Image (cartoon, helix red, strand yellow):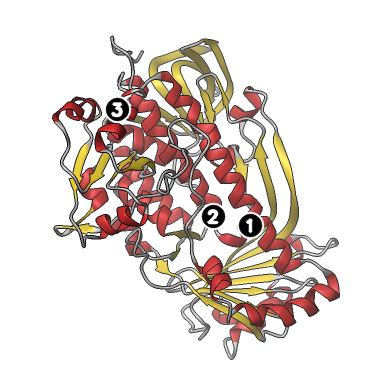
Amino acid sequence: MSTDVRAVPVVIVGAGPTGTAAAIELGLRGIECLVLDRWEDVYPQPRAVHLDDEVHRILDRLGVGEQFSAISRPGGGLRLVDRTMRVLGEFARDGVSGANGHPRANMFDQPDLEALLRARMREQASVSFRGGVVVDGVEQVAPSRTIVRFHDVETMAEHTIDAEFVLGCDGANSAVRAAIGSSMLDLGFEQRWLVVDVATNADLRQWEGVHQVCDTTRAATYMRIGETRYRWEFQLHDDETAADFTDTHRLEPLLRPWLGDVGMGELQVQRTAEYTFRAAIADRWRSGRIFLLGDAAHLTPPFIGQGMGAGLRDASNLAWKIAGFLTGRLAADVLDSYEPERAAHARAMIVLARRVGVVMTRGGRMGDVLRRSVVPLLDVVPVVGQQVTDSTTPPLAGSPWIDATRGDRLAGHLCPNPVIDGRRLDDVVGTGWALITTRAVAPSAESTLDALDCAVVETAAGDELATWLGRGRATAALVRPDRSVIASGPDVTRLCAALSTLLAPLPALTSI
């Protein structure tokens, strides 16, 4: 039996971190949406364990920054060791990022973060959630109408719903991706790894950062997630599976280098699971009003800890564009900017993660010899150390919503997030646009800024924002809701005029 569900402007398929983040972003802007997920509650298994200061900043804008700080543990950086646990190189990444105002490395348990995001999502009056359902099909039947078919897991009752937009946040095996005929392009990296999550009150007395064992025979990773939570990851041999390591006697030789005098009896093994680390990206992220986000659009090997963060960046990039279009403030071509901006950025991070993974895990005996010889030298080369420890991601490019004209040094980069009168810039600006300027705004530009509820932040010589503008040879910068700079330069009026060309024509478009 099929029943129809009332139409909504946006349907989000998948309530993991990416889907809930997108729902919150839309909810904060008053956009009605329905989130569909297979699970009624948070999926209990730990998966992602790290995010950087840029992604922590996104969480803060979503309204869960303080709660996340309470459930996360700042990381110490990266230590590279050989198979005998001899330290080859150490790259500190502790402390708070001056640019974003959050710890540079944050360790956490994914179910804890998802619980925060779901609670925040439920606070949004315009967001509805429906768990225990499976999406069976997505079909765009008109330029502004897409039908989503789904059924209840328990009753098998079938439903349809009309939406203007569908966001596929449904993971690596995305039904939405299949519905639009998109395929994953293999970027040349696939490895099977054993993931071991452990809880213990024992003190392992290890360095408080990520330990990466650089070894062709058995590459491995160790990290402390929380006060009592630890994770190990071990590259599996061709003849091994996770089922071979359910017995603690088989696990002990793998864990022993980090345990010291701690016995296996003091550990509670929460799970052992096999994961295939892949590097892949969808050949297209959009069909009409249907978009792919998160693992549905890209898969990143875990070596630089950017997998889950990439999905949150997707949500941060797309949600304000959809909201701007639905409220009639932004022209329709703003939707065209999502895939060019995010696909190029995601591919760059995937390629970097793949490169790091290859350097750490491949090369045979000669590779091990080279690592023992070369890695210690990296510690004393400042530019290399900066690349390892600096979490700043590449600037966005490739769309009219990032001014890539020659000489604009700030376009595409995130603006800083300094403290202004006791509050961070993001808190001062809220969810909207910002004009950061050292000069007064001319009356002729005020109407454009008002059309977007653009906050004007005036800064003076010596202030952090003024110094940032000076480094970019600018006196003003237009900042998008995702905190990327759309354009900067010496002329405030010119920036506002450029922005006005991107606004929706009158009469304003309306949502369904």
Q: Nearer the viewer, mark 2 or mark 3?
A: 3
Which residue has dot 1 on it?
353
Question: Where does label 2 land, which residue?
Answer: 306
Determine if residue 16 is in view: no
Q: Amino acid at mark 3?
A: Ala
Residue 65 visible, this orientation: yes
Q: Residue at x 53, y 83 (%)?
A: 206
Q: Would residue 444 be found to the left or right of residue 78 on screen?
A: left
As measured in the structure, the alpha-carbon distance from the residue carrying label 1 to the one carrying label 3 is 40 Å
Are dots 1 and 2 in contact, CB under 8 Å? yes
Q: Residues within 10 Å of mark 1 (few under 14, many from 20)?
A: many
Q: Position of residue 3 (x, y in %)?
A: 47, 13
Q: Nearer the viewer, residue 25 or 117?
A: 25
User: Residue 455, percent across and down?
Assistant: 20, 39
Residue 219 to residue 488: above or below: below
Q: Nearer the observer, disc 1 or disc 3?
A: 3
Q: Amino acid at mark 1?
A: Ala
Residue 497, disc = 3
Badge number at residue 214: none
Which secondary structure, mark 2?
loop
Inter-mark Cα distance, 2 to 3: 36 Å
Give the secondary structure at mark 3. helix
Tell me where residue 104 appears, x and y as whole percent.
42, 65
